[in-house]
Image: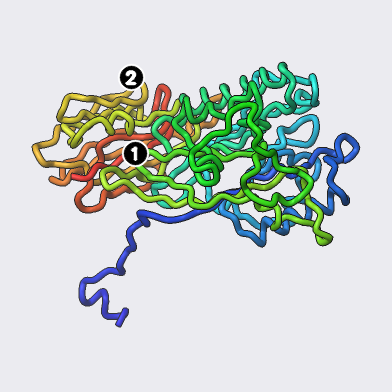
Amino acid sequence: MLPFLPLLGLAPLISAAPTSGRFNILSFNVAGLPAILNSNGVPGDKTTNTAIIGQKFAASNIDLIQVQEDFNYHATLYENDNHPYRTATSGGVPIGSGLNTLSNFEWVDFDRVKWEKCSDIAAADCLTPKGFTFMRVKISEGVWVDAYNIHTDASATAIDKWARRSNMEQVSEYITKNSYGNPVLVFGDSNSLYTREGDVPTIFRTEQNMTDVWIELIRHGVEPTPGSDVTQCNDAEVPSSTECETLDKVWYRGSSLMDLKATMFQYATKTFLQPDGSVLSDHNPIQVDFEWGLSEKYRMSDYWGGPHGDFFNDMPALDAVAAPAVKSVTIRGANRVDAVSITLTNGQTFTHGGTGGTAYNLTLADGETVTEVELCQAKYETATKSHTRIFFMSVKTSAGNTISAGVRTEECVTRTAESGWGVVGFVGRSGDEVDRLGLIYGKH
């Protein structure tokens, strides 16, 4: 019957984006230091072991894998894996951090950050530029999670604990600045134990409202006290249960836009064994399954634009408004989009970008909503940089009123709100102009 569709004035149905789903993650320190520096106490050849790890990554098809100590056997790992999205190595010892991500999901805004403090007192933590990575991962259309991969200072001397505490504080400060209002995952080799005096694995709970999955699902919300007799997992064998504590951990939180819930925690060591049953690394890989569901009040679009400027997010402020409605929208622009601004009927205004260009304003009538936004991106070239920015933006309302600013390019997208929804805010990056833009929709 499809040939008759044009005659009937019909169009193929377009499926709405999912409003809920599942994904899983894996954290694994793959013991990739050169064998001459550290055998990690693991039997077998490191190149062979790394190849097996890569093959098992491919077979498991886990959605988001973050590895630590991925140093001098990185090429072997990737040769045996088939995840479509993978970070480029930062190098072997002593150049790289050993942190990499293998994913079924695409991402934006990838960043490598070196620790500000390290200690060589008991381990060679300053030998390589250890630190953490950040990326904004696209789980589904309009569903983004900020993922951090960490490898903190090792060992248990007072100096090591001091350095590790600084490491954890550095990640927390970065989250505060760059991930406010967003769902967040932090996982990797924390080198921390709740039972160890002077460690601070609680920092993401106390400062970022995050949950440790092991504490939530295995310990039923009860954190071990420092100095308590909770058993530490034996790194040389498959843990007999998940009750033992390991240095590798997973923390998470959802947001006003998305509920996020951990549903399963396991040490996946049995999956990652040599043919003779020996372990492949001196760390137990951690696997966690998650469920997510979108808010009934707010939704978000995908991003458009480039990875420059400072992050902004109107969602935390919108969350305090009972029923946000838009009074006016302003776009400033000339050759590009300099700034965007939205004012709610309660008088609250969100403005992002600079002061250049000409301002174009659209005032909405009662009940009128912003239903469609067109965005165009391109490279802004100067003698010292080539940055993708938003070059053009147009806004259309439910009454058919429009404004626009900037210059159209060949790379454009149109975001259209679903029936019963309208644009009420923005999320993205900006400086003196608008670099990246996403839309926040509110239900009306």
- Category of crowding for the residue at label 2, using alpha-carbon neighbours closer than 10 angstroms: few (below 14), some (14–19), many (at least 20): few
Q: Viewer-proximal residue, 156 or 349?
A: 156
Is tag 1's residue or tag 2's residue first in the polypeptide sequence? 1
Q: Which residue is mark 1?
A: 256
Question: Where does the N terminus fall, quadrant-wise?
Answer: bottom left
Q: Viewer-proximal residue, 68 or 90?
A: 68
Q: Amino acid at mark 1?
A: Ser
Return the x and y of residue 91 as percentages of the image width and height: 75, 36
Residue at (34% x, 21% y) in the render: 356
Image coloring type? rainbow
Q: Which residue is mark 2?
A: 355
- Category of crowding for the residue at label 1, using alpha-carbon neighbours closer than 10 angstroms: few (below 14), some (14–19), many (at least 20): some
Residue at (77% x, 30% y) in the render: 95
Q: Secondary structure at mark 2?
A: loop
- Side of 131 where 298 appears, left or right: left
* 154 in relation to 104, above or below: above
* Quarter residue 424 falls in: top left
* 95 in relation to 302, above or below: above
* Quarter residue 434 falls in: top left
Q: Viewer-proximal residue, 208 or 195?
A: 195
- Side of 275 where 319 appears, left or right: left
Residue 87 in sight: no
Return the x and y of residue 274 as percentages of the image width and height: 80, 57
